[in-house]
Every structure is written in C-alpha cells, then in structure tokens.
Image (cartoon, rainbow, N blue to C red):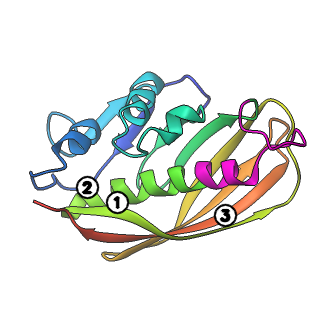
C-alpha cells in the first residue's frame, strides 16, 4: 500500500465497554469488529493521543497501514535529527514502538485487553540524513498476555536503517 491510499484497520471480536471507549471508538466500526479508513483517519487516530500520547504527532509519524498482522508508518528525518545531522536513534525507537504498540493494541482489544510496552531494543545499521524513513512491523508472537513485534526501518532508497524488536504486555482493560 502506498502512502496516502486507503488503509484498513481490522480487529477481532467486539471489545468490552469501559474507560477506554475513546480508543475503542477510533478502532472499531459500526459493527464493532472492522473499520476501514483512509490515511487521514489513521492520522487522526495518532493525533488524538489515544495511542501515543501525542508523541507520534510531534515527530510527524504517519500511519499508512494498520492491522493486527502488519503495521506500516513513516516519519520525516527533518525535525528528528541529532546534533550531527543524522536521524536520532531515539526517533527510530519511537517509530518502532509506535508501530508495534498499534499492532498490539489492535490484537489485544479483540479480547478486552490493552497493550503496554515492556521492552524494546534497536540496532542502527546506517544513518539517514534526509527524506523519510518507513517502518514495517510484523508480529513474532501474538498471545493473550504478550505480543512481540519485529520492526524494520528503511530510508527512501529502501536501505535498512534500523531493526527493532518490541514486546508489549497485554493487560485487562480497566473498567
């Protein structure tokens, strides 16, 4: 899927109601199990702070595809550089954790749970100095208590910039 084209958010069974209705409202459709939206709708989800507390918006992260099986997003290098003009390693970690957390949330809400990150690691393979980087998150394990994701981040030329692994704990949603 190319940036700007429609993206689909798919979820499992309808979640319980409670304190996290704001988040669930962004992720579930009228039938409670599937929502299809465009890239603008995904941007609204990120901007709402429902998943990222606003950090994704501050860093310019754009989600272009999201499901419990794959999450894709991109981020500009501009505004996310360290003092030597290179993409900051922490910015790559924020992108990776955002993508893995969205996928974990989509997986977890199917059985009334929420996802919280408990571990992330990253290996930075090369620098990025301009353009955008794109992250693709794919699940390694999707269980009832843990979800683990591999995230690969590439530059505009398709060169691997960073690989990361994120594990989220899936907890019962507070009522």
Q: Is residue 106 left or right of residue 6?
A: left
Between the C-alphas of marks 3 and 1, the distance is: 19 Å
> Residue 87 lies in magenta, yes or no?
yes
Asked whether 90 falls inside the magenta stretch, the response is yes
Q: Which sits earlier in the primary sequence, circle 3 or circle 1?
A: 1
Image position of 72 with respect to 39: above or below: below
- Residues drawn in magenta: 79-95
Q: Residue furthest front?
A: 83
Determine the secondary structure under disc 2.
Answer: loop
- The residue carrying pointer 3 sits among few (fewer than 14), some (14 to 19) or many (20 or more) residues within 10 Å by Cα, namely many
Q: Secondary structure at mark 3?
A: strand
Q: Nearer the viewer, residue 116 or 149?
A: 116
Identify the residue at image location x=59%, y=51%: 94
Q: Residue at x 50, y 41 (%)?
A: 55
Quadrant where the N terminus sits is top right
Q: Which residue is mark 2?
A: 12
Residue 99 in picture, x, y percent from top left: 52, 50
Q: Which residue is mark 1?
A: 107
Residue 73 placement, left or right of 104: right
Picture coordinates of residue 46 (x, y %)?
43, 36
Q: Quadrant of the C terminus?
A: bottom left
**Disc 1 on helix, strand or loop?**
helix
| Residue on which disc 3 sits | 164
Mark 3 or 2: in front is: 3
Closer to the chain start, of discs 3 and 2, is 2
Residues at badges 3 and 2 in contact (C-beta under 8 Å)? no
On screen, 71 above or below 58? below
Mark 1 touches mark 2? (CB < 8 Å): yes
Q: For the residues carrying marks 1 and 2, which lies nearer the camera in this image?
A: 1
Q: Position of residue 146 (x, y in %)?
A: 39, 75
Is the Cβ of the residue at disc 3 closer than 8 Å to that at disc 1? no
């Amino acid at each position: 899927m190319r940036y700007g084209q429609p993206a689909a958010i798919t979820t499992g069974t309808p979640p319980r109601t409670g304190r996290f209705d704001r988040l669930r409202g962004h992720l579930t459709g009228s039938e409670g199990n599937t929502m299809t939206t465009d890239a603008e709708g995904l941007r609204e989800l990120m901007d709402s702070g429902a998943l990222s507390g606003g950090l994704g918006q501050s860093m310019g992260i754009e989600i272009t595809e999201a499901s419990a099986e794959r999450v894709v997003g991109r981020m500009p290098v501009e505004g996310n550089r360290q003092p030597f003009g290179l993409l900051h390693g922490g910015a790559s970690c924020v992108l990776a954790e955002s993508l893995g957390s969205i996928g974990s949330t989509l997986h977890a809400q199917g059985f009334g749970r929420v996802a919280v990150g408990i571990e992330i690691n990253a290996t930075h393979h090369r620098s990025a100095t301009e353009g955008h980087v794109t992250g693709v998150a794919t699940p390694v394990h999707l269980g009832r208590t843990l979800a683990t994701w591999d995230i690969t981040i590439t530059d505009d030329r398709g060169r691997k910039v960073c690989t990361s692994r994120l594990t989220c704990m899936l907890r019962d949603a507070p009522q």
